[in-house]
Image (tube, rainbow, N blue to C red):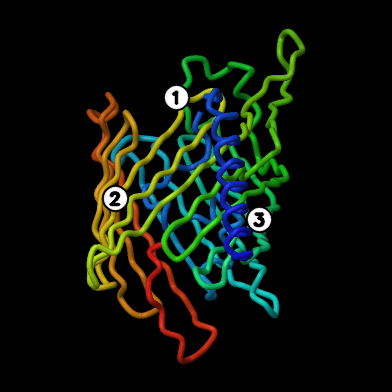
Amino acid sequence: MIQHVKTSVFHKIFLFISITFFAGTISVKSQQDPQYTQYMYNTQIVNPAYVGSREVLSFGVLGRMQWVDLEGAPTTGTFSVNSPIGLMGDMGLGLSIVYDQIGPATESNAVLDYSYSLQLARRNISKLSFGLKAGVDMLDVDYTKLKLSDPNDPLFQSQVDNKIQPQVGAGIYFHTQKYYVGFSVPNFLNSKHFDEGSLDNDEIASIAVERLHYFFITGYVFDLNPNLKFKPATLVKFVSGAPIQWDMSANFLINEKFAIGGSYRWDASASGMLGFQATEGIFIGLAYDYQFSAIKDYNNGSYEALIRFDIFNKADKILTPRFF
């Protein structure tokens, strides 16, 4: 009874914190960080509290080509690895690397992710995790790739070469075997990249500003029958200067082998997703996005592929896909 009361209180506290963060940031408006369709399999990139939650050494690689055939369209690649650590497995440690290119700009970052978890209930295996991420972000901007009306414009005379800024972020993540909720800010630092070239009015021109990004994620797994699971999930992203991005997805897992589903990005695109648990430790996922906005007339959609490779701590440990 005491354990049940404690668990109930923790659930209410966590729900209150999540709603407070959600309501407190609803007014912020540009997407700067890369976007992902298969975000449910790429959680570590946006939330450090996720690391170690799968209880295995897990590697992930994701590649995304956005707006294919549109010159200068975004191309993104991510690599992540994480594992539980500590005698009790109550901590997690990971590394995540992101490479993102759009037009003349190339941005990459490498960060370490750390999490600490509190086990709230043993029978239902519910955990509340707190995460931190810290690393560096590097920006290059090559103005020679731009078609300028005035090649002598002083704003575009100095390249941005390997401009390095620190990155510090945090997140919280609660999960059971059936559902999860998370909130995170991958980078708290409002970093600015400058072009200090001489201007007529002796001002310093700001080339790029890294704005705060807020991520809210949640999902639930329903057992429709012994061979079929259904998981609705959502991701909400807010960043000042841009509309709120709201992704909703629905996926089915068949015989713990095949995943099929779709997603909708509010007022932007619809996507189809396929996944295959090739072996006990290897999962492969594919996605295609169809754009709704006017940009659809100038590209052939967006493609995304990922592979996740899990290494078990014990030779006899068999994975029953938790589906997140």
State which mark lies toward you, 3 or 1. Answer: 3
User: Would you say residue 46 is visible in this rendering?
Assistant: yes
Q: Position of residue 246 (x, y in %)?
A: 40, 35
Q: Give whichever of 318, 69 is nearer the camera.
A: 318
- Residue 250 shows which numbered tag? 2
Q: Give whichever of 2, 146 is nearer the camera.
A: 2
Task: Give the quadrant of residue 24.
Answer: top right
Going from the N terminus, do you reach mark 1 or mark 2 first? Answer: 1
At horizontal 31% and vertical 72% (from top left) the residue drawn is 277
Question: 62 above or below 206?
Answer: below
Classify residue 231 as left or right of residue 244. Answer: left
Report which residue position mark 3 lands on. Answer: 130
For label 3, the crowd category at 10 Å Cα-Cα, with few meaning under 14, some 14 to 19 and many 20 or more, is: many
For label 2, the crowd category at 10 Å Cα-Cα, with few meaning under 14, some 14 to 19 and many 20 or more, is: some
Q: Count every numbered label the image shows and give the total.
A: 3
Q: Position of residue 108 (x, y in %)?
A: 58, 48
At horizontal 29% and vertical 72% (from top left) the residue drawn is 256
At horizontal 38% and vertical 61% (from top left) the residue drawn is 306
State which mark lies toward you, 1 or 2. Answer: 2
Q: Give whichever of 207, 259 is nearer the camera.
A: 259
- Residue 303 shows which numbered tag? none
Question: 304 above or below 162?
Answer: below
What distance separates the C-alpha of mark 2 from that of mark 3? 27 Å
Going from the N terminus, do you reach mark 3 or mark 1 first? Answer: 3
Please name the amino acid that badge 2 sits on. Answer: Ala
Going from the N terminus, do you reach mark 2 or mark 3 first? Answer: 3
Please name the amino acid that badge 3 sits on. Answer: Phe
What distance separates the C-alpha of mark 1 from that of mark 2? 42 Å
Q: Position of residue 27 (x, y in %)?
A: 54, 23
